[in-house]
Amino acid sequence: MEQELENFIKVWFSAIISVSYCYHLSSRIKPGALRLISVLPVCTLFLLIPLFFSSVHFSGASAFFFTWLANFKLILFSFDKGPLYPLPQTLSRFIFFTCFPIKPQQNPKSQNQIPKWVFSIKVFIFGSLLHTYDYKQHLSPTMLLVLYSLHIYLELEILLMLVKVWVFIFLGCDLEPQSNEPYLATSLQDFWGRRWNLMVPAILRPAVYNPVQRIAERKVSSDHARFLAVLATFLVSGAVHELIFYYINREMPTGEITWFFVLHGVCTAAEVVVKKRTFVGRWKMSPMVSRLLTVGFVVLTSGWLFFPPLVRGGMFVRLPNEASLFIDSVKHKFFTFES
């Protein structure tokens, strides 16, 4: 743990220096290829950062924050696009908006605020899940699938909420929500585009979807261009997830994660096309039924393609062990008093 914390400090020191260079020097270069070339050394560093860690939490979080989102933001920044354009007024904001999965809230009044007690319930459920792993050998495959799905969702939700609170304390500005209760999704389009891990579609839309759609429309119809853009977006997401899980497991990718996202890309694109048909517009499905179908499809396909590489790599053994170790260390440091 001490070595991980030491590497953590070194990584953040390097990241702050690198992002400061982008703010003070790269931003002065004309948008385009030259600015992109100037930020490529930073992108290369961010590709290497997760390799400095051995724990699931540090390697996974650094891969998500730096290798994926920060690199995509800097590439978009090279062309005056994405969440870093227009250029934040201060260096501190540029660092926070680059290194964390956040963006300032545009329309605070239009956002639905989730009650604080909902987050408290999620924390309680997550704590209960950690104890459930002690009885994992007695659980059926279906229950394990539910356990793994809840774990991924709740841990990501708690991590992003802590980041949001921490950044709010430093910057004092309202931030966009990172997710919007994905278990309430009524379609795959709703799940991936408007509810799950919202910083990701906010990055992939200008980085992949819009350019592919714009190029494809020169050759094919708008519907076909939209289909290709959706598929390309999910394909890129799958490839990046393969890279993230390589950092976590240190095993060569099997392609299962990519196929998971390709499957969801095809289904989401098909869903968009079907919704435009006249006969579908006249037929309304109950929100409860559509939610069950949507979440059920996500969970079942996750059990088929998404979770197996993680289970084989021992991620769901290491995750609860690391979480329990962290909780015990906090208890020992802050709640143990000498008599």
Image: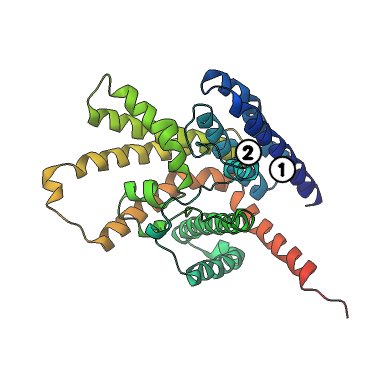
Residue type (three-letter) at the residue carrying disc 1:
Trp
Q: Quadrant of the C terminus?
A: bottom right
Relative to 127, say whether 53 is above or below: above
Measuring from the top left, give residue 39's x and y in whole percent: 61, 26
Relative to 100, say whether 236 is above or below: above
User: Who's the residue at 53% across and 35% down the image?
Assistant: 73
Looking at this view, name the residue that lies furthest to the bottom. Answer: 339
Mark 2 and mark 1: Cα distance apart in space: 18 Å
Question: For the residue labelled by badge 1, is the local secondary structure a helix, a strand or a loop?
Answer: helix
Q: Which residue is mark 1?
A: 12
Residue type (three-letter) at the residue carrying disc 2:
Tyr
If you read the primary sequence from the N terminus, does the residue marked by circle 2 or circle 1 appear first? Answer: 1
Measuring from the top left, give residue 266's x and y in whole percent: 32, 37
Mark yes or no: residue 262 visible. Answer: yes
Q: Nearer the viewer, mark 2 or mark 1?
A: 1
Say left or right for 64 vs 284: right
Q: Which residue is mark 2?
A: 247
User: Who's the residue at 72% across and 60% down the image?
Assistant: 325
Measuring from the top left, give residue 32's x and y in whole percent: 51, 21
Say left or right for 287 vs 239: left
